């Protein structure tokens, strides 16, 4: 962390007013540039984007749709350069009505369209460089890569090789193909990218009750009512033909972006659920702790503790840290205590009597295992991230409209929670491997007039937000909160920032806002905190290709709105937030 001697990291920027319109806004004194948009070149031989002449082959070389997580990794590897690096970006999902002329609904998509749609998923890795204060993609870089639902990958950890993972594609239960539904993620201290497979249930068609995995699929929420057209054309997503295929998704995937030939690894030791993201912290004993949330109403917060230790001089060994260790699930009790319950086969109820044969089963059925351990059902746990300055852990809980009166608890205190809240967890003596933490309510979000809202009393009229989803910390430990689902009371989704300690604790200030109907994802700082990258996802979501509600960012009559990654700098340079 770079800390200038006299700079205390105060958030002195001038707040942006609340509002909603068809373009992107950032606080006065800051500049934003669109770095890359859906359809732009990633690989050197990608054709120029033309939505009227799109093909799967073109899309497989171009930037995908609905950018979510962004992670910056300095180049060269191991440096803390802030003007040159790699950007890893998730492409979470697609919206056929906004992508194709004629605005087809998913069910009406042709095979050619379904193939394009598939190639618009996954991730992009791009090399980027800042010249004269402006970021640009390095065209033709050897690092530039597309990862898609058909990229060759491997299962690792306790479930790898399980008979339950055997499919036509995977005779050994180890080989696997591709990733999709990639929501948020994280960057590890050893220079890899973690990407979280979230809403993977939406791709499968058929009757899950007719498979051997009926119990797992019911608990996962996989109904066979697919929202994507892939299953119409490929047996892989047809439960009648590929009954085990859903067990290949719902994992954390680790990618080495510095080796474009590397095969991504699915880390089954972190459990299978609707992972929102995954953030790794090196504990004081050098074991690594990975925090992850399962983003669905009434699901859980998890942490993984590695068996082996991080060694800054042995990257190859670090690459295997997430293969072996113990996964825990959180129980939040009213007295401010978090108890981490280990998900270990043979311990407590995780035995053959409850259908578990081995640790692989515990990881595949991790929600069921967590149910049996009495974990606390939360209001949609999204990003879970460690504050690098204070060592405390912040949990974004986005909302839960289905929580009933009488089913609230101290950690989820509002019935019909429309706007979410943020919890701070504190490990004892900074030991993240400990079985017990303390927790505290940090913010209860929403319009301050809403029942139960809680912020610093001095927030301005623009300082409130709703639906915290992703977060990031700057080098001074300030929390930067990105929202998904606000659009309440004339407020767009965007970013709000606050201190986490001292007199300005929880005094949130409005920093940026998205074009109509977009959510804001994946904020990420360069190491010097002078640039800030973020994703504008699903701009113009309520419109169609033929009748758009915005044409951000191009504002050209021949282009629909395009999800894009935005780079933000302070005009003339300086720390973001100052
Ligand atoms: Fe993809 Fe949990 O938002
Ligand atoms: Ca999210
Ligand atoms: Ca984050
Ligand atoms: Ca969300």
Image (spheres, rainbow, N blue to C red):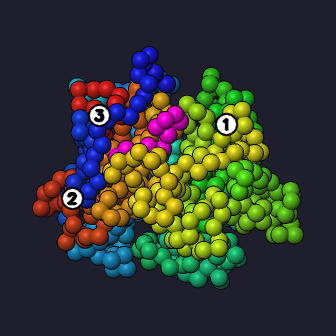
Where are the magenta residues, as a range? 501-510
Q: Nearer the viewer, mark 2 or mark 1?
A: 2
What residue do we see at 55% from left, 73% from top? 402
Give the main secondary structure of the magenta stretch.
Answer: loop
Dot 1, crowdedness within 10 Å: few (<14), some or many (≥20)? many
Q: Which mark is residue 22?
A: 2
Which quarter of the rendering shows the C terminus?
top left
Whether 202 is drawn above or below 437: the answer is: below
What percent of the width, then of the height, locates residue 133? 25, 28
**Quarter of the figure with residue 21:** bottom left
Q: Say whether mark 2 is within 8 Å of ligand 4.
A: no
**Quarter of the figure with residue 137:** top left
| Residue located beneath label 3 in the image | 569
In this rendering, the count of numbered labels is 3
Res. 314 in view: yes
Distance from the alpha carbon under mark 2 to that under mark 3: 21 Å
Dot 2, crowdedness within 10 Å: few (<14), some or many (≥20)? some
What percent of the width, then of the height, locates residue 437? 71, 44
Dot 3, crowdedness within 10 Å: few (<14), some or many (≥20)? many
Q: Nearer the viewer, residue 197 or 212?
A: 197
Q: Nearer the viewer, residue 553 or 236?
A: 553
Whether 52 is drawn above or below 72: the answer is: below
What percent of the width, then of the height, locates residue 504? 46, 37
| Residue located beneath label 1 in the image | 288
Q: Say whether mark 3 is within 8 Å of ligand 3.
A: no
Mark 2 or 3, nearer chain start: 2
What residue do we see at 23% from left, 31% from top? 571
Distance from the alpha carbon under mark 2 to that under mark 1: 43 Å
Left or right: 150, with 514 as reference point: right
Residue 506 highlighted magenta (yes or no): yes
């Amino acid at each position: 962390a770079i800390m200038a001697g006299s700079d205390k990291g105060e958030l002195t920027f001038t707040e942006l007013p609340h509002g909603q319109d068809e373009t992107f806004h950032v606080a006065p004194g800051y500049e934003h540039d669109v770095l890359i948009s859906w359809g732009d070149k990633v690989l050197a031989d990608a054709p120029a984007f033309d939505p009227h002449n799109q093909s799967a082959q073109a899309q497989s070389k171009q930037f995908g749709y609905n950018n979510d997580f962004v992670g910056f990794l300095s180049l060269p590897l191991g440096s803390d350069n802030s003007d040159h690096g790699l950007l890893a970006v998730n492409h979470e999902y697609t919206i056929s009505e906004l992508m194709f002329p004629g605005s087809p609904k998913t069910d009406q998509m042709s095979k050619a369209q379904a193939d394009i749609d598939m190639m618009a998923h996954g991730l992009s890795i791009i090399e980027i460089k800042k010249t004269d204060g402006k970021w640009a993609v390095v065209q033709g870089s050897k690092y530039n890569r597309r990862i898609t639902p058909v990229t060759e990958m491997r299962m690792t950890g306790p479930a790898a090789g399980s008979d339950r993972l055997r499919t036509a594609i995977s005779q050994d239960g180890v080989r696997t193909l591709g990733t999709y539904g990639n929501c948020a993620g994280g960057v590890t201290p050893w220079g890899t990218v973690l990407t979280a497979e979230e809403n993977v249930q939406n791709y499968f068609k058929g009757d899950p009750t007719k498979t051997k995995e009926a119990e797992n699929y019911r608990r996962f929420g996989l109904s066979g009512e697919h929202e994507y057209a892939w299953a119409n054309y490929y047996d892989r997503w047809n439960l009648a033909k590929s009954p085990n295929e859903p067990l290949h998704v719902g994992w954390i995937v680790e990618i080495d972006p510095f080796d474009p030939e590397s095969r991504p690894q699915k880390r089954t030791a972190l459990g299978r659920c609707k992972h929102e993201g995954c953030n790794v912290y090196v504990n004081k004993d050098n074991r690594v702790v990975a925090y992850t949330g399962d983003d669905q109403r009434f699901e859980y917060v998890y942490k993984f503790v590695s068996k082996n230790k991080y060694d800054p001089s042995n990257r190859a060994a670090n690459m295997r840290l997430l293969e072996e260790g113990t996964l825990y699930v959180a129980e939040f009790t009213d007295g401010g205590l978090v108890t981490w319950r280990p998900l270990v086969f043979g311990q407590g109820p995780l035995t053959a009597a409850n259908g578990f044969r081995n640790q692989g089963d515990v990881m595949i059925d991790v929600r069921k295992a967590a149910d049996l351990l009495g974990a606390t059902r939360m209001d949609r746990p999204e990003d879970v991230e460690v504050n690098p300055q204070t060592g405390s852990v912040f949990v974004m809980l986005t909302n839960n409209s289905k929580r009933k009166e009488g089913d609230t608890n101290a950690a989820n205190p509002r019935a019909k929670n429309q706007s979410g809240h943020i919890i701070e967890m504190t490990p004892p003596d900074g030991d993240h491997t400990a079985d017990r933490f303390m927790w505290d309510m940090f913010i209860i979000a929403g319009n301050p007039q809403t029942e139960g809202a809680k912020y610093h009393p001095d927030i301005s009229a623009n300082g409130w937000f709703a639906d915290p989803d992703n977060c990031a910390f700057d080098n001074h430990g300030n929390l930067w909160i990105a929202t998904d689902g606000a659009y309440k009371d004339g407020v767009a989704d965007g970013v709000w920032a606050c201190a986490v300690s001292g007199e300005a604790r929880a005094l949130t200030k409005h920093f940026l806002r998205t074009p109509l109907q977009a959510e804001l994802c994946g904020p990420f700082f360069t190491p010097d905190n002078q640039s800030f990258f973020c994703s504008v996802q699903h701009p113009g979501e309520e419109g169609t290709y033929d009748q758009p509600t915005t044409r951000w960012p191009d504002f050209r009559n021949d282009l629909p709105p395009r999800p894009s990654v935005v780079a933000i700098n302070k005009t003339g340079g300086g720390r973001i937030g100052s």
